[in-house]
Image (spheres, rainbow, N blue to C red):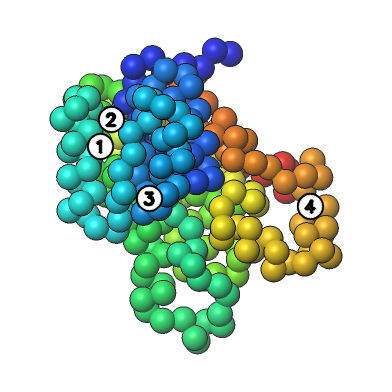
């Protein structure tokens, strides 16, 4: 199966590390012109250095809707439209588990802004060009926590990822008549960024051993495993696949 994206315009959010970097590099290696954004300026610089001339980067707070729209407008001005949108940015926003009664409204809302509202805003900003073209791909990075309770125990994160799964399924129905597919990749536990590494270390040797033993393949995955699933969803081979949530978790 030959997957390539010659001259396609691809927008990947959260490209400063982990999944986003692997996804951006995966598209770039297959002929796409890639734009990626993140709040991590140094991480973006490394992403760009590893794919010289193939990945354009921008420091962006994705919770700033006006800035987000200006960013998408700049890509459309340069390329005409976005062919593939990958809503990868997300996470726990530096939070750790706390009992329900200790959670503040700000803690709850920021996780939703990063994981759900930003994905909605990027889809809203890129959909008109896809509709005009009569085709397009949107891939949302959700989580195993979008389908069951989260290993993090963070209430807002679990709820937000469930909401992102719902958004995926709803946009599939709305945008399908325009030739736009909308799917989601739900990663299992991967040590791909500082937050997941902190979580891994918190389990200790015994907890780490138990986690791996619950995985059928008896190993953790890596960022490329997630990127490969995204590349499939974005490819012509997935032209009749939409509204699907693909768990990439080694069998858990």
Q: Label 1: state its secondary structure.
A: helix
Location of mark 4 (residue)? 212
Q: CA distance from mark 1 to mark 2?
A: 6 Å
Residue lying at 45% horizontally and 64% vertically, measured from the top left: 93
Mark 1 and mark 2 residues within 8 Å of each other at the beta carbon = yes
The label shown at residue 41 is 3
Q: Nearer the viewer, residue 201 or 12?
A: 201
Q: Tag 2 or tag 1, which sits nearer the N-term?
A: 2
How many marks can you see? 4
Q: Tag 3 or tag 1, which sits nearer the N-term?
A: 3
Q: CA distance from mark 3 to mark 2?
A: 23 Å
Mark 4 and mark 2 residues within 8 Å of each other at the beta carbon = no
Q: Label 4: state its secondary structure.
A: helix
Q: Callout 1 environment at 10 Å: few (<14), some (14 to 19), or many (20+)?
A: many
Residue lying at 52% horizontally and 43% vertically, measured from the top left: 19
68, above or below 21, in the image: below
């Amino acid at each position: 199966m030959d997957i390539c994206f010659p001259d396609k315009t691809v927008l990947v959010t959260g490209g400063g590390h982990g999944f986003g970097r692997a996804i951006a590099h995966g598209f770039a290696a297959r002929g796409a012109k890639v734009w990626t954004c993140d709040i991590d300026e140094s991480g973006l610089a490394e992403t760009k250095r590893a794919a010289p001339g193939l990945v354009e980067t921008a420091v962006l707070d994705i919770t700033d809707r006006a800035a987000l729209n200006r960013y998408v407008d700049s890509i459309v001005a340069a390329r005409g439209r976005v062919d593939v949108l990958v809503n990868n940015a997300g996470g726990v926003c530096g939070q750790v588990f706390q009992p329900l009664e200790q959670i503040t409204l700000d803690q709850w809302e920021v996780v939703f802004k990063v994981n759900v509202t930003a994905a909605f805003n990027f889809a809203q900003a890129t959909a008109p060009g896809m509709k005009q073209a009569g085709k397009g791909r949107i891939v949302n990075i959700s989580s195993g926590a979008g389908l069951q309770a989260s290993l993090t125990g963070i209430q807002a994160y679990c709820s937000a990822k469930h909401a992102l799964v719902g958004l995926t399924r709803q946009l599939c129905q709305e945008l399908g008549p325009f030739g736009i597919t909308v799917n989601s990749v739900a990663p299992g536990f991967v040590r791909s960024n500082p937050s997941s590494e902190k979580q891994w270390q918190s389990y200790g040797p015994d907890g780490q051993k138990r986690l791996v033993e619950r995985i059928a393949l008896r190993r953790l995955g890596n960022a490329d495993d997630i990127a490969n699933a995204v590349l499939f969803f974005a490819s012509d081979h997935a032209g009749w696949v939409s509204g699907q949530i693909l768990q990439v978790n080694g069998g858990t």
